[in-house]
Amino acid sequence: MRSPTNECIEWRDQLLEDVDKVGREEIQRVLSEIDSKKGHVAANTWLRGAIERYLLLSQVSVMRPIVAKHANRLAEEESIDAAMGWLRSVVKRLVFCDKVITELDGEELAFWAAKKSRYFEVEIYEIGLQCTPQAMKDFMYIQLLEVGLKFKHWDNVDRVAGLAARMITPEWWIRQAKRQWVIVEDVLRECGQVERFKSPYLSNWALNKAEKQRENNEAFLRGWEAVNDFGQSFTLEQLSEKGISNPDNRFAELIVRAKGLEELAEESGHDGWFITLTCPSKYHPISQGRRNKKFWREGSPCVRTAHRYLNVVWRRFRAWCKRHGIPFYGLRTVEPHHDACPHWHLMLWVDPRQSNDFLSAFSHYALQENGNERGAKKHRLTVRKIDREKGSAVGYIVKYISKNIHGKHVDTDHETGRSGVDAAKRIVGWARLNRIRQFQFVGGASVTVWRELRRLGIDKAPKVFADIYHAANRADFGGFVKLMGGVFAGRNQTLQTYYSEGEENQYGEMVKTVKGVSRGIEVVTTRLYEWTVQKVGSGSLSSGEGEAAPPWTRVNNCTPPNIGPVNRRSY
């Protein structure tokens, strides 16, 4: 066998220029071994692929061992070309700015965001002075490409200006960086790191991110306060405990609303159905405890792609029901399988004379895609009639509501064998990371009106629609819905949410905010105070003891400063 020529050695050295010392030594060791066994031609062929693989893996930083292991598995099970194609896609998805996003966190992330926002501000200002408006748009377009965002409103001057104002702030860049955490999680899921026996629902990496984010949020809420125009102040933590961001309050409200719909269903004699809708097998990375080849060959659909599939099925089904005059109402919950693929649980009520057509249509649309695959007819759509004699309809779904909020009413999660609290922590993290709405009511009445009326104390009860107010105040959701026009009132409900006139926000955009509720020209204001957020102890709104607070605008009309003791925003 021919030994490598001087030209060959020189060519190899050029390829190895970008490889670090340790990697270069390892590659040269393998090259020498192949040279001696198969010759320099075979060694050079191996080197071309090895260099690209090494450089690709070097860009995924701390994820390298996991990614390399999965690439090796693909090379064995599929082909080397398939493994390299996947590796290239990983790097293309993960490379974002100067470092792989897994390494950006805390102070380092804040520093990076400040640097990016400052660079954008300086450049856009100089381009604006020296070039055309189109040059400014071109620069913004390139910056958006870097963070993987698309903007469709380039012809709208106000929206472009609003986007530019956001991109000047470090907060905007931090949000874009955190969006990339979803991509990291997608890659870990493709590598088999999200499943029942390793880390169900959410990878350990993402769970740690979620826990750190929760701690940061709690520290922020403790360190900032809301002050109104009468000088009253509350920490954001205190206000958070009073609202639905408090898991106990959120759970209670959902149960009250579901119970209200159940009472209306019983009164109307409607059939109740508990339905579970799942995705085709190709959306699952794990099938029966093993890697699913359908998932890989489909291009490894992410969680959001699977959820879009479920939404498409739902939209088609709802459109069919509307065309055929079959109204229904109820509640939908979303949660993941152990491998993070979403599925839906629905509690729906419909006229018993229409139940058969209703269920037949749902089954049809659920099986439109890959409906003939093994197990599809059995598992894709499962239906159970709610028997009032065996228990409350809410009892069917209460464990799913609890599991998706705090897990306090679930002893053991049957999907994973973990405690309900641990499962809930992972499921909430999964939903927030993937930006999935966990609960949605179908039919009923406006929850915004319900919440706004419950803001008022008994001493401020409105006289013009006192009956609706009292139904909301005593948590009688069924009575509230009836007074609002019934479960199918829609936009014709008795009361509407009342919004303020458009006001300019800190990005120069006109926005409307909730001010109260209305019926025709009758308006009841529920937002009685103007609130400003500031750091705890940063100062009082009043100019002196017993003096009235000076007038403050509802929002700042310019981008808030990046530094300073007070960041005043109204909510």
Image (cartoon, rainbow, N blue to C red):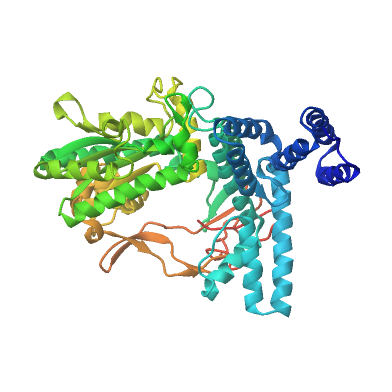
The answer to whether residue 139 shows anywhere in this view is: yes
Q: What is the quadrant of the N terminus in the image? A: top right
Vertical side of 9 occupied by 406: above or below: above
Observer-nearest residue: 252 or 387? 387
> In the picture shown, does residue 541 fall above or below 409?
below
Task: Report the front residue among 124 and 280.
Answer: 280
Judging depth in this view, the residue of 395 and 479 nearest the camera is: 395
Residues 309 and 173: in front is: 309
In the rendered structure, the answer to whether residue 565 lies left or right of residue 241 reads right
Q: From the top left corner, tell me how far across and down residue 93 is, in percent.
A: 61, 48
Q: Residue at x 71, y 38 (%)?
A: 61
The spot of residue 187 in percent (x, y) is: 57, 39
Left or right of residue 570, residue 20 in this image: right
Residue sitting farthest toward the left: 353
User: Image point 39% across, 35% down: which residue?
Assistant: 281
Q: Please, is residue 209 above or below residue 532 in the view?
A: above
Q: Is residue 340 visible?
A: no
Residue appearing at x 40%, y 20% in the figure: 412
Counting the numbered discs, the total is 0
Q: Residue furthest front?
A: 1
Choose top left, top right, bottom left or bottom right for residue 411: top left
| Residue 402 point in image, percent of width and height | 38, 31
